[in-house]
């Protein structure tokens, strides 16, 4: 298990991360989400010794992370580190050899991963000839080729088309089923909500919420109600008299306190027209994240 405790890093007067704590168990996917500049990349880079924290600890299976532990990790940085003129398959095998994989095995693994990621027909192309999305896949292949026990992926879905996103999800699930732990950052909260076992929300360098997706969604005690009417004769946003999260001409999503009177809300909504939908649920991850990013503690 990867365990980070009390991680802090300052750059002069700027606090990059402040007392960050998170854990990634084997066979679990943890989503690391936050606004730009929240401290996600700094935390990830600290795992690999690319950033030296001012304080805190980073351990793997109960021991401080050292070179032997790092050899069992796979890392996909936000700023890609590929050699543009090197051929795709050669590059993947090269990075495997750098981590101690013998040449024959490295070549076999590179071939297998390229087939899995749908890049077998581009194996002899220079990386610079590939699209941004395909370069992204090559970078992912580099992180996978050593068959790591932990994957740390910084914005791995950025720039991928829907087919590539689905392929990456399948690859991650397959690795997780084999006991690999995954920590990845993303701004695609619908995707995070769909595939993660746990999430960690970081805002301005501090962890504001963590746990299962359901736990983070429900941490505030608030609920959301989605109301839709047929041929409205009045404005839904005006008659419901509740905090509006989203609205259209015929529907509205409002926030309701844990002790909110749903019967009263339904009665008010009926003033706008015949009700065709009235759903009551936890806030979406997007709504919960928005509250945190705006400084509202959950």
Image (cartoon, rainbow, N blue to C red):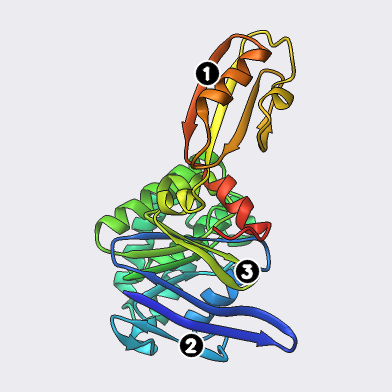
Q: Categorize mark 1 by other alpha carbons within 10 Å: few (<14), some (14-19), many (20+).
A: few
Residue 89 can be seen in this image = no
Distance CA(mark 2)–CA(mark 3): 25 Å
Residue placed most toward the observer, 171 or 52: 52
x, y (%) of residue 165? Answer: 49, 45
Give the mark nearer the N terminus: 2 vs 3: 2
Residue at x 56% of width, y 88% of height: 53
Quarter of the image holding residue 74? Answer: bottom left
x, y (%) of residue 157? Answer: 54, 53
Q: Quadrant of the N terminus?
A: bottom left
Closer mark to the observer between disc 2 and disc 3 = 2
Q: Secondary structure at mark 2?
A: strand
Residue at x 73% of width, y 9% of height: 233
Whether 171 is drawn above or below 89: the answer is above
Residue at the far left in the pictured view: 178
Q: Categorize mark 3 by other alpha carbons within 10 Å: few (<14), some (14-19), many (20+).
A: few
Q: Which residue is mark 1?
A: 277
Residue at x 38% of width, y 67% of height: 145
Q: Which residue is mark 2?
A: 56
Whether 49 is drawn above or below 220: the answer is below
x, y (%) of residue 220? Answer: 52, 52
Q: Secondary structure at mark 1?
A: strand
Q: Categorize mark 2 by other alpha carbons within 10 Å: few (<14), some (14-19), many (20+).
A: some
Quarter of the image holding residue 242? Answer: top right
Distance CA(mark 1)–CA(mark 2): 50 Å
Distance CA(mark 3)–CA(mark 1): 45 Å
Q: Which residue is mark 3?
A: 79
Closer mark to the observer between disc 3 and disc 1 = 1
Q: Secondary structure at mark 3?
A: loop
Residue at x 30% of width, y 58% of height: 176
């Amino acid at each position: 298990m990867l365990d980070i405790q009390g991680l802090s890093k300052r750059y002069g007067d700027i606090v990059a991360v402040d007392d960050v704590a998170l854990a990634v168990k084997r066979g679990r996917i943890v989503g690391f989400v936050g606004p730009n500049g929240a401290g996600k990349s700094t935390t990830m880079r600290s795992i690999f010794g690319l950033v030296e924290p001012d304080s805190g600890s980073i351990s793997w299976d109960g021991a401080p992370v050292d070179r032997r532990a790092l050899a069992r990790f796979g890392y996909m940085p936000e700023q890609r580190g590929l050699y543009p003129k090197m051929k795709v398959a050669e590059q993947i095998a090269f990075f495997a050899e750098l981590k101690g994989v013998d040449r024959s095995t490295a070549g076999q693994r590179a071939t297998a991963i390229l087939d899995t990621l749908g890049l077998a027909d581009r194996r002899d192309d220079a990386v610079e000839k590939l699209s941004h999305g395909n370069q992204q896949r090559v970078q992912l292949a580099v992180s996978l080729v050593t068959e790591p026990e932990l994957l740390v992926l910084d914005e791995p879905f950025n720039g991928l088309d829907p087919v590539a996103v689905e392929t990456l999800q399948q690859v991650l699930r397959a690795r997780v089923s084999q006991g690999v732990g995954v920590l990845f950052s993303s701004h695609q909260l619908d995707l995070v909500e769909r595939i993660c076992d746990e999430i960690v929300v970081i805002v301005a360098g501090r962890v504001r919420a963590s746990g299962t997706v359901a736990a983070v969604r429900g941490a505030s005690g608030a609920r959301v109600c989605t109301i839709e009417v047929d041929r409205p004769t009045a404005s839904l946003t005006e008659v419901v008299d509740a905090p509006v999260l989203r609205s259209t001409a015929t529907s509205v999503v409002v926030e309701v306190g844990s002790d909110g009177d749903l019967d009263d809300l339904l009665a008010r909504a009926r003033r706008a027209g015949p009700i065709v939908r009235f759903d009551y649920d936890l806030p979406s991850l997007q709504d919960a994240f928005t509250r945190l990013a705006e400084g509202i503690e959950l």
